[in-house]
Amino acid sequence: MDQFFSLWHEAARTSVGFFWMAFWAFALGYLISSLIQVLVTQERMQRLMGKDGPRSVGLGTFFGFLSSSCSFAALSTTRALFNKGAGLAPSLAFMLASTNLVIELGMVIAIFLGWQFVVGEYVGGVLLILVVWLLVRVTRPRRLEAQARKKMDDGEEEEHGEHKSWKEKVTSRAGWQQIGQTYVMEWQMVWKDVLIGFTVAGIISAMVPESFFQMLFIGSGGENAANPGFGAVLAQTLVGPLAAFFTFIGSMGNIPLAAVLFAQGVTFAGVMAFIFSDLVVLPVLRINAAYYGWKMALYILALMLIGIVSVAMTMHYGLAALDMLPDSSNAKSPGEREFFQVNYQLVLNLVFAAVTAALLWLWRRAQKAHSHGGHEHHDHGGSSLTDRVLQVLASVAALWLAGGWLAGAFSAPGAA
């Protein structure tokens, strides 16, 4: 029983710790999304990213690199860009760049996995954008794009004060109240997915043995692990997205688990596919479906899966040809991470907690103004069966996390 309480506490602590690491990135991404939705006019966005040509895709990649955020925040910002008239390929380029071409992600990868994986992340990220762009040009999903834009038009209210310039909006109280409303709405759309996803990630990280992942990736840890054949490399690359589905904690949180996989003999391609797969898991699919409809969400999923597998295989055999593949025999599993420290994450979290508090205050003021004026705020939530199920699961997750922290008292040394 003491061992269970100890594992329960570790799982809860890991879940909260992973979210603590990512909170500032969530807040930054949703702030950027809110600013884009309120301040950027459709005409300006169409001029910059309204086509699927090289310039627009390059701009989408550049803007994504600048925004560098976690996957949930990237989804929100991508939706804002697409809704403002950006082309599908530039929007997807932004989403991929903001989750893969990230400076802090490269630093964590270098610490846990080595420089070869940093090269795989950045070069592979650019290749992934190019592959997705090529697939969009080949498939030409114009009908899906039209349906997705119509869904967003049907679900959005007319923006008040659209005739005002961004300078007028950003210097007015009404403009910042609208930004606050949009910011809160973004959190309302995904908080259940975030809570459930991080809770499950903590459970798997603390309670699922490493041997499970070794069994999942066929050919790892065996006699041929040092020199696997093409079939084993392809199989592990295909399993990478599946493993990420069960261990989803975002690109930053996936890196320690990726190091565990590599230490267990999973190939470079399998590990890279696992790292790239933060955008092809169920919470992301559901959010995309809420944004664009299920047809477009499944289309984006197919693009990502094809791109991830092909790029991971390309990077694997490219490094192999240059005799630069990393050796997993020297890899070490990551030790217990100390989440709560006085460091840059603490400073960033405090800063964005203050930003969130200010935007919440603006949102409350706007809500009161609407109620006094007799206006109803449009409900972007919904009461579908999926939403009700997620509400129940989110409540269970919250209880699990609270119980896990309390369980620490029973697992502490000297506890009865």
Image: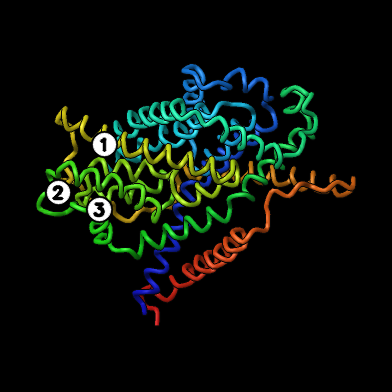
Distance (Cα) linking label 2 and label 3: 11 Å
Mark 2 element type: loop
- Is 240 displayed left or right of 136 in the figure? left
Q: Earlier in the sequence, mark 2 or mark 3?
A: 3
Label 3, residues with CA under 10 Å away: few <14, some 14-19, many ≥20: many
Distance (Cα) linking label 3 and label 1: 15 Å
Residue in the picture at 58% in, 26% down:
86
Q: Nearer the viewer, residue 371 or 130?
A: 130
Classify 409 as above or below 73.
below
Report the quarter where the N terminus lies: bottom left
Mark 1 element type: helix
> Please, which residue is most extreme toward the bottom here?
416
- Is 355 displayed left or right of 62 in the figure? right
Q: Which residue is mark 3?
A: 217
Distance (Cα) linking label 2 and label 1: 16 Å
Classify 106 as above or below 63.
below
Q: Which residue is mark 1?
A: 313
Q: Which residue is mark 2?
A: 225
Quarter-of-image position of residue 201:
bottom left
